[in-house]
């Protein structure tokens, strides 16, 4: 049984910068038994990052679509795990207004970090939260999750103008903000035409290159195996590979390192 103090110690052992910016992809199941459950895990993350900025994805792409195109920032559940739903409801946490790829943020600059997402026209647009991770030189923690959950790499592909990654035609979405105001936006969604498939399933192929380039290292949180990534290095390494081969993630063929 893990306690909050034990979890805080593990975060420190991973050398996570408590005054920096940390994005966390998470699997509560992978962590194991925790005294106090998911609330204790969120307590530990928020306490550790109290002097920095803590960000968790609160995506809704699984249920927000052309037939269900209204996103209410206060009530719409996240489709990416228990911890994200506990975190988004905490006092002081701010959730962005992106209809399908929202994030929730707590701490330093949280309000500024999430601003403007209702004006994005793709999941990881330039100027949005995912590029802000790059600009803030964030760390990305895969807490019991593989690199296939690396939404940031969707952004790297977008910023490198990789073809066949977004729908050709935008769809209409509506976001209801915290004050009840309705914002309308048009979104091009993640999409691949054959022969490519869901490209994120192949993001794990970058692990050897990330290791060689010092972009990731390993750690533990509870029972969960963790990968701690450097956003700048991951973007630089991935961009270099994409410049050589824009079809890098079209399939699972291994990369040369």
Image: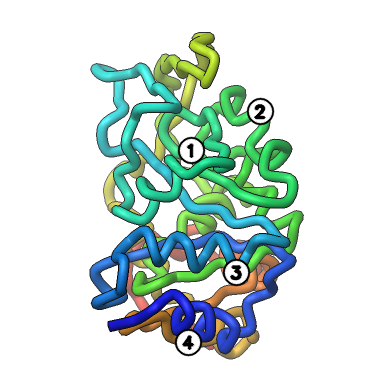
* Residue 185 in view (yes/no): yes
| Mark 3 vs 2, N-terminal side | 3
Residue at the disc numbered 1 = 102
| Mark 3 vs 1, N-terminal side | 3
Question: Camera-side residue: 186 or 243?
Answer: 186
* Kind of element beneath mark 1: loop
Give the foreground label among 4 and 2: 4
Residue at the disc numbered 4 = 219
Give the foreground label among 3 and 1: 3
In this rendering, is residue 18 above or below 116?
Answer: below
Question: Camera-side residue: 19 or 201?
Answer: 19
* Kind of element beneath mark 2: loop
Give the foreground label among 3 and 2: 3
* Kind of element beneath mark 4: strand
Residue at image x 34%, y 37%?
Answer: 61
What number is the disc on residue 116? 2
Task: Give the crowd class for mark 4: few <14, some 14-19, many >=20 residues within 10 Å.
Answer: some
Quick check: 165 left or right of 108?
Answer: left
Task: Give the crowd class for mark 3: few <14, some 14-19, many >=20 residues within 10 Å.
Answer: many
Determine which quarter of the picture holds residue 179. Answer: top right
């Amino acid at each position: 049984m893990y306690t909050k103090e034990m979890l805080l110690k593990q975060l420190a052992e991973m050398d996570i910068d408590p005054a920096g910016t940390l994005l966390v992809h998470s699997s509560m199941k992978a962590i194991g038994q925790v005294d106090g459950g998911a609330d204790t895990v969120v307590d530990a993350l928020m306490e550790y990052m109290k002097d920095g900025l803590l960000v968790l994805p609160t995506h809704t792409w699984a249920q927000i679509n052309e037939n269900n195109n209204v996103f209410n920032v206060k009530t719409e559940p996240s489709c990416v795990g228990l911890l994200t739903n506990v975190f988004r409801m905490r006092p002081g946490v701010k959730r962005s207004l992106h209809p399908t790829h929202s994030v929730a943020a707590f701490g330093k600059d949280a309000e500024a970090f999430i601003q403007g997402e209702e004006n994005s026209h793709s999941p990881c647009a330039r100027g949005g939260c995912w590029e802000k991770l790059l600009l803030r030189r964030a760390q990305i923690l895969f807490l019991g999750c593989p690199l296939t959950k690396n939404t940031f790499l969707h952004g790297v592909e977008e910023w490198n103008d990789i073809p066949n990654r977004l729908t050709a035609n935008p769809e209409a979405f509506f976001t209801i903000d915290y004050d009840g105001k309705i914002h309308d936006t048009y979104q091009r969604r993640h999409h691949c035409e054959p022969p490519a498939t869901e490209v994120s399933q192949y993001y794990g192929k970058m692990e050897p290159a990330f290791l060689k380039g010092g972009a990731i290292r390993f750690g533990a949180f509870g029972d969960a195996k963790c990968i701690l990534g450097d956003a700048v290095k991951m973007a630089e390494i991935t961009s270099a590979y994409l410049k050589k081969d824009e079809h890098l993630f079209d399939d699972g063929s291994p990369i040369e390192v």
